Image (cartoon, grey):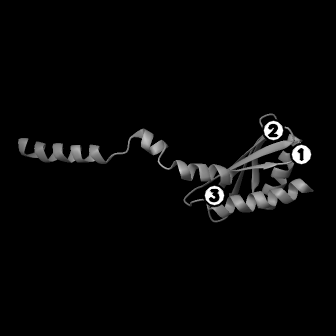
């Protein structure tokens, strides 16, 4: 039994040295997280939250999403798109400042990474629908 203890103990010590702390995991790449937040968030020069939410819903439907949930009091919309994989989006519409609505979209995909182009396509389409 003792002959297994030394190798196992050294292996455990080696594993402990290479593990990331929870803080490292959470703050692993602050620059990438800030870049992603900038990609996810846009402000629009409109004042009506309901009109903005309607534009978000129309945009999602134009992009072949099915609306799962919408709550005008919270300014929250969730939708799903099935296209060979499942793509979910959650959108939060909120007052940014007087005369500005803040729209933050968060995509998540099952078994596939979400590309930056998904955000760009969503916000480009939303810009057209908000202007109407």
| Distance CA(mark 1)–CA(mark 3) | 28 Å
Q: Name the residue furthest top.
A: 73
Q: Residue at x 85, y 41 (%)?
A: 49
Whether residue 30 appears in this view of the structure is yes
* Number of the front mark, 1 or 2: 2
Helix, strand or loop at mark 1: helix
> In the rendering, which numbered label is found on residue 97?
2
In x, y percent, where is residue 77? Answer: 75, 45
Q: Position of residue 116 (x, y in %)?
A: 64, 61
Query: For the residues marked 1 and 2, what is the alpha-carbon distance in whole angstroms?
Result: 16 Å
Q: Residue at x 87, y 57 (%)?
A: 129
Circle 1: is it few (<14), some (14-19), or many (20+) Cα within 10 Å?
A: few
Q: Secondary structure at mark 2?
A: strand
Q: Residue at x 87, y 41 (%)?
A: 99
SS type, badge 3: strand
Q: Do the numbered discs 1 and 2 sit on residues whose CB atoms are within 8 Å?
A: no
Task: Identify the mark nearer the N-term, 1 or 2.
Answer: 1
> Looking at the picture, how far across and down is residue 12, in whole percent?
22, 44
* Circles 1, 3 touching at the beta carbon (< 8 Å): no
Placement of the N terminus among the 4 image quadrants? top left
Of the numbered discs 1 and 3, the one sitting upstream in the chain is 1
Above or below 6: residue 110: below
Residue 51, disc = 1
- Asked if one can make out residue 1 in the rendered structure from this viewpoint, the answer is no
Specify few, some or many for label 3: CA neighbours under 10 Å numbering under 14, 14-19, or 20 or more: few
Q: Which residue is mark 3?
A: 86
Left or right placement of residue 14 versus residue 67 in this view: left
Please state if 130 lies on the left or on the right of 107 as rendered: right
Residue at figure coordinates x 22%, y 43% from the top left: 13
């Amino acid at each position: 039994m003792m002959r297994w203890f030394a190798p196992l103990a050294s292996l455990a010590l080696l594993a402990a040295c290479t593990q990331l702390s929870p803080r490292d995991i959470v703050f692993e790449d602050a620059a990438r997280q800030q870049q992603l937040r900038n990609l996810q968030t846009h402000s629009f020069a409109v004042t009506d939250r309901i009109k903005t939410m309607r534009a978000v819903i129309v945009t999602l439907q134009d992009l072949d999403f099915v609306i799962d949930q919408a709550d005008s009091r919270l300014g929250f919309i969730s939708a799903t798109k099935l296209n060979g994989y499942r793509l979910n989006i959650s959108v939060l519409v909120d007052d940014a400042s007087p005369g500005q609505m803040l729209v933050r979209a968060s995509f998540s995909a099952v078994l596939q990474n979400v590309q930056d182009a998904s955000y760009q396509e969503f916000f480009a389409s939303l810009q057209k629908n908000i202007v109407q």
